[in-house]
Image: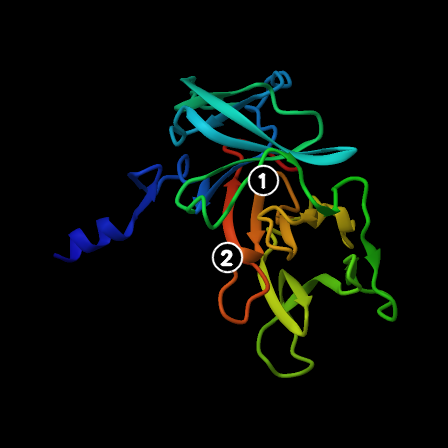
Amino acid sequence: MRRAALITGAMLWLHGVALAQDPLQNKSAGTVVLLPPTAGAVGEDPPLAGTLHLPGREYRAGSGWWALACDGACTLAPLQLAVAARPFPQREDKPVSGQALRFSPAPPAGTLLLFKPLRAPASALPWRAGAVDTLHPGPASRLRARSGTPGTQETELPLPDGRVLVVRPVRHTLSRWPGEEHDGTLVLELTFDGRRQTLGRFATTDCEPLPLRRDTFLRWAGDLDHDGRPDLLVNFSLGVEQHLALFLSSLAGPGQIVGEAGRFRLEPIDVDGC
């Protein structure tokens, strides 16, 4: 009985299929499946537009995919996904199982995120092709340092109605007591309308110098779910891994500003240093 419980606890439901926990699987988690715009194998040439090469066998072909792209204006574009088995190379070891993913049409220029609502009902997340109301379009940053907080990374994002969203990476303390030394963990906090929420931990390494650029950790902000409140695309990676998370205001729980819709995390299989 105990063995069966352990096996059940080590499974993750994705695409309607129970997948065992495996370092090559479970890169995408949540009600919305996320993929980065590019992710190639070690030592490969840059992938063709609209293609990804990933280890594991996690994804299935089909429709229902979207690209969030900002090339001047920000837009949503519908996509189809084709999947083929393709071994994923490593530098010193033999290849592992992998998949070649090809989107059609090719994602637009300036694509920040590829995603597919998997378990979220269409009525709750009414995606629509075309322009997306955007507060922070990525590289063309509208973020600003928060006044009165010199020496910190507190960042303000002004909204058209005069309200201000505050995002800040902060060191996680070992206890609630003032002056307690931090444990080295860097977390991302969000403050809005008198509420504060911790969104998650950064994967800190020596590869990314501190302080961070503001558009490094906040990749995009706008109204993706059309509810009039801000949604966020966050980069939690400070090194060689890829770690993206999408937060939607329409999925916020009690007392929350946003709720986590989906997350993509891929640690390189065979990468030395930065």
Q: Is mark 1 on a helix, strand or loop?
A: loop
Q: Read off the residue under disc 1.
A: 241
Count of labels shown?
2
Q: Using residue 204 as the reference point, say whether residue 66 is left or right of it.
A: left
Answer with the quarter of the image where residue 249 lies: bottom right
| Disc 1: CA contacts within 10 A as few (<14), some (14-19) or many (>=20) | some
Q: Is mark 2 on a helix, strand or loop?
A: helix
Residue 58 in view: yes
Q: Which amino acid does label 2 sit on?
A: Leu
Return the residue found at the far bottom.
Answer: 177
Q: Read off the residue under disc 2.
A: 251
Which quarter shows the N terminus? bottom left
Q: Using residue 165 as the reference point, say whether residue 245 is left or right of it.
A: left
Residue drawn at (77%, 61%) of the image: 161
Residue drawn at (59%, 18%) of the image: 44
Residue drawn at (84%, 56%) of the image: 144
In depth, the one of 258 and 14 nearer the eye is 258
Sequence-first disc among 1 and 2:
1
Residue 88 in view: no
Residue 258 rendering spot, x and y as whole percentages: 57, 59
Which quarter shows the C terminus? top right
Q: Using residue 161 as the reference point, say whether residue 56 is left or right of it.
A: left
Residue 198 rendering spot, x and y as whole percentages: 59, 64
Task: Calculate the distance from the C-alpha at mark 1 to the C-alpha at mark 2.
Answer: 27 Å
Q: What residue type is labelled 1?
A: Glu
Front tag of 1 and 2? 2
Residue 238 rendering spot, x and y as whole percentages: 66, 46
Compared to residue 154, the image places residue 38 above or below, namely: above
Residue 178 rendering spot, x and y as whole percentages: 67, 83
In depth, the one of 234 and 123 nearer the eye is 123
